[in-house]
Image: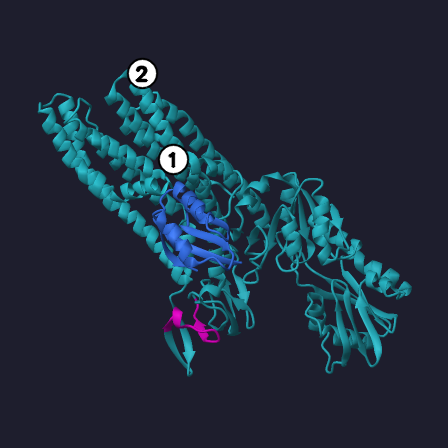
Chain colours: A blue, B cyan
Amino acid sequence: MKKIKLTIEGMHCASCASNIERALGKIKGIKSVSVSVMTKKAIIEAEDSVNIEEIKKAVSNIGYKIINIQ
Amino acid sequence: MNHNHSESKGFEDKEISDWKVKLIGAWLFTIPLAIFMYSEKLGLFMIDEKIMTLVLLIAAFPVIFIFGFGTIKSGIKGFTSFYFNMDSLIALGTIIAYLTGILSFFIAIQDYSGISSMIMAFFITGKFIETKARGRASQEIRKLLELGAKKARVLRNNKEIEIDITELKVGDVFIVRPGEKIPTDGIIIKGESSIDESMVTGESIPADKKPKDNVIGATINQDGILYVKTTKIGSDTFLSHIIELIEDAQNTKVPIQKLADKITSIFVPSILVLTALTFAGWLFFSQDISKSFGIAVAVLVIACPCALGLATPTALMVGSGIGARKGILIRKGEAIQTMKEIKIIVFDKTGTITKGKPELKKIYSKNEKHFLELLASMEKNSEHPISKAIIEKVVLKKYLVVKNFKIIRGKGLEGEINKKKIIIGHTGLMKEKNIKFNEFKNKIKEFQEQGLTTAMLAENKKVIGIFGVADELKEDSIKAINYLNKSGYKTIMITGDNEVTANVVAKKVGITQVIAHVLPEDKANKIKELQKYGMVCFVGDGINDAPALKQANVGIAMGSGSDIAIESGDIVLANGSLRGVVASINLSKATFSKIKQNLFWAFAYNVIMIPLAVAGVIHPVLAEIAMAASSITVVTNANLLRNKKI
C-alpha cells in the first residue's frame, strides 16, 4: 500500500471534486480517494502496483491537470 | 514540501486574478450590449431585428467563447467524457441561448444571444466572488504558510553570516536576537529567553526557555540572545507538520455531507434530463418554441450543485482555521459531528490534568542512606518521569552497579545490586511478587492521602523504604473541568495510580468518578466499557494513549509545544491546556451547526428554485444571478463562523 498526494489544477466546483474521486476510484488497485475542493489536493491510498501514469491519464481524460505529486 | 505549499497558495491567487480578467472582459462587452438591447426594447430607438441580432451575436461572442472559454471547454469535456460538472450546465445553457440568435435568421424564434452574454458575465462574476470568498475561508492556513522565516543567521567558522532558510542544515547553529523570528526548529545550546509561541500553539503566555529546551520555528524570541542548534528543517518542522495536518483534514469527510455528495455526483446529469423533459413538455403544451428555449436555459443555469458541494468543505476549512489559531488542530472532519453526541469525557491523569512532571516530595525509611543509594542507582537506568523526578532530587557521588535491569511496564523496575534482588513498584507489584509491606501500610496510606503517588523499594523481598511523588495540576485544569461539569458532561479520570492518590487529585480538580489502577494497555478497554453508556471523548497524551484515543468516539490528543504526537487523536491540541478541550467542543459544535445551516440553504435553494424555473416563472438572467448568489451565500456564511466566540 502506498499513499499518494496530488495537487490538481482546474477544479473550480464541488462537482469537479466528485468527478475526480469517481474517475480515480475506477482505477484498479486504488483503495480510497478523497479530493478536497478547498485545498485542490487528492489523497489516494493505493496498492503498490498502481501506476502513476494511469492516475495522470485518468485525471487528464476528464479535463484536469496534476501539477504536483508526492 | 514548503515548496508545494507556496505553490498551492500561488495558484489560488492566480485563480482569483484569472477570474478578474475574465470578469472585466466579459462586462466590457456585456454592459454596452445590455444597454443597447434594453434601450431598443424600451423603444428608445428602432432598429432592424436582423441587424440587432447580428450586433448581439458579435458582442456576445467574445464573452462566451473568449472570456468564457475555460468554462465552455471544461463543460464540453463533461459531455465527451460523461463526467459532467457545473460548467456543463453553464456551457450548454449559454450555447443554446447563443444559437437561438443564429437560428433566428432562419426560423421565427426569439433571440436569446444577448441573454447568453449576460448569463456568462454573471456566472463569471459569481465565480470571481466565490473564489475570493473561498480564499478567505483558508486565510488562517495562508497565514501559517507565510509564517515561516526566510533567512537564518548562522555561525560558520566562528563568523555570523546570514543565509537563506533553504540552505540551513540540521546541526547548524543559528543565532536569534530579541524580537527576531526563530528560523526553524532547534534546541537551545546557549542563552535564555522567553518565547512567544502563540502563532503556532495558540498559547498566549510566552514560554521561558533555557539551554537544552526545544524551540519551534516561526515563533518569536522576546528577550535574550539565543544560540540554537538546528534539529529539523523544511517539511520536518513542527510548523510544516501542523500545516500538513490541517490540509489533510480537508480531505476527510464529515458524515452529514454524504447525502450532499451523493446528490452532487448525480446532480448535473439529472438536471440535463430534467431540462430536456422541461423543454419537451413546454414545447408540447405551449407550442411556443421561443418560450420553451428560454425556460430550458433558465433550468440549466439555475441548478446549483456548487452550493451543495461547498456547504461542508468551506465550513470545515473555516473551522479548522479558527482552531489552528487557538492551537486546536482538527484532524478528522468526523469529530466535528460526533462531538455533539458526546456524553462522557474521560481524562487521563498524568500529563493531561496534571503537568506530567512529577516531583519527589517525601521519602520514608529506617535506613535512609542505604535506601536512597539503591533507589537512585536503580532509577538512573529508566527514562520514566517518576525516575527522572527521583534522580533529579537524589544525586549520588557514585552509583551502584545494577545488573539484570528490567522495566516492568506500568508497574515498576527490577534489577540486582550487589547480588541482591531489588524491586521498585507500587503495592500491586509487591503483592504480585509476594512481598510483604505490613510495617509500611500506615505510612503508605498517609502519603497517598496527601495525593502522592507512592511506591516502595524491596531488597531481597524485604521492603526497606517508600517514596511519594506528586504531579501538580495544570493551571487551567480546574476551570476547564468545572465548565464541562456544568455543561452537563460526565467527567471521569483514568489513571494507573492507586485509588487513594487518584481520588485526591480528582477531588482537587472537580472530578467525581475515578478509574484507578489501569495499566496503559487497558485504557482502551475501559473506554470500550464506558461506551455502553454513551459516546465517549478521551483526552490524553498522544504517545502512550494512542489505543484509547482510537477507541474513543472522539480522541483529543494533548501536546505541549513541539512534543505533540500528531499521528493520533481526531483532534490535537498544540498547547497542553485543558482549555483547549472546552474550545474544541465549542468549535466543533459551532462548525457543525454552520455545516447544517449551509446544507439546509443549499438544499432549500435547489428544491425551491429548480421547480420555479421549470414552471417558467424565472427569467434566465435572474436564474443565473440566483445561482451565483446561492454559492456565494454558502461560502460567505461559512466565513461568518469567525464571528462566533469559541
In front of the other: B302 or B43: B302
- Residue type at mark 1? Val
For label 2, the crowd category at 10 Å Cα-Cα, with few meaning under 14, some 14 to 19 and many 20 or more, is: few
Is B374 situated left or right of B635 in this image?
right
Q: Which image quarter: residue B425? A: bottom right
Q: What numbered label is drawn on residue B474?
A: none
On the image, the x and y values in percent for residue B104 come to 17, 26
Is B277 situated left or right of B321 in this image?
left
* Disc 1 chain ID: B
Mark 1 highlights which residue?
B268
Mark 2 highlights which residue?
B285
Is B389 covered by the magenta stretch? Answer: no
Residue B645 in sight here: yes
Q: Determine whether the residue tagged by mark 1 lies in a helix, strand or loop.
A: helix
On the image, the x and y values in percent for residue B632 come to 36, 37
- Residue type at mark 2? Phe
Discs 2, 1 touching: Cβ within 8 Å:
no
Of pointers 2 and 1, the one earlier in the residue sequence: 1
On the image, the x and y values in percent for residue B384 come to 69, 67
Tell me the magenta residue range: B163-178
On the image, the x and y values in percent for residue B114 come to 19, 31
Name the image quarter holding the N terminus of chain B.
bottom left
Marks 2 and 1: which is nearer the front?
2
Q: Which image quarter: residue B611? A: top left
